[in-house]
Structures are given as structure tokens and as C-alpha cells.
Image (cartoon, rainbow, N blue to C red):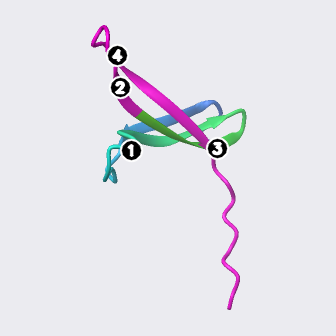
Amino acid sequence: MSYDKTNSGTLGKNQRKETDKHPDYAGQINIEGKDYWLSGWIKQNGSTGEKFFSLAVKQKEDRKPEPKR
């Protein structure tokens, strides 16, 4: 029995964060059968001080092999 991961994903602490521009959390998500990278930053509202997630998705692309030289 295989697990259907359609329309689901994971997000965890980014262990490779090196600068403030790198996401605080990273993972992957599948939306309608297509795979995406998922990134999340913890932000804070300037007027209320409330914390929230800012999210971004980027479609995973098939990597083409480097041409031989």
C-alpha cells in the first residue's frame, strides 16, 4: 500500500540557514500532482507585534544533466 501525498507537504526548521534572507523553515508540498519547494519566514507585524508566517512556493524543475565538455 502506497501513501498518496497529493495536496500535502512538510515544513521543518531550515538547518542550512546562513543569512537573514534564507527561509526560517523549508520543505516541499504537492499541489494537484505537481511538486513544489516550500519556504517560510517568521515575520512580525510592526503595529501589533503579532508573529506570522510568510510563505513562498517554487515549482520543482527536472534538472537537466550538465553537458560534457
- Residue highlighted by disc 1: 21
The disc, 1 or 4, on the residue closer to the chain's N-terminal end is 1
- Residue highlighted by disc 4: 45
Q: CA distance from mark 2 to mark 3?
A: 25 Å
The disc, 3 or 4, on the residue closer to the chain's N-terminal end is 3
Q: Residue at x 69, y 88 (%)?
A: 68
Do the residues bearing badges 2 and 1 touch, measured as CB atoms within 8 Å? Answer: no
The amino acid sitting under disc 2 is Lys
- The answer to whether residue 31 is above or below residue 23 is above
Query: How many other residues sit within 10 Å of disc 4, few (<14), some (14-19) or many (≥20)?
Result: few
- Residue highlighted by disc 2: 43
The disc, 2 or 3, on the residue closer to the chain's N-terminal end is 3
Label ID, residue 35:
3
Q: Quadrant of residue 24?
A: top left
The amino acid sitting under disc 3 is Asp
Q: In the visual, does 45 lie left or right of 66?
A: left
Q: x%, y% of residue 51?
A: 32, 18
Do the residues bearing badges 3 and 4 touch, measured as CB atoms within 8 Å? Answer: no
Do the residues bearing badges 3 and 1 touch, measured as CB atoms within 8 Å? Answer: no
Position of the C terminus, as image quadrant, is bottom right
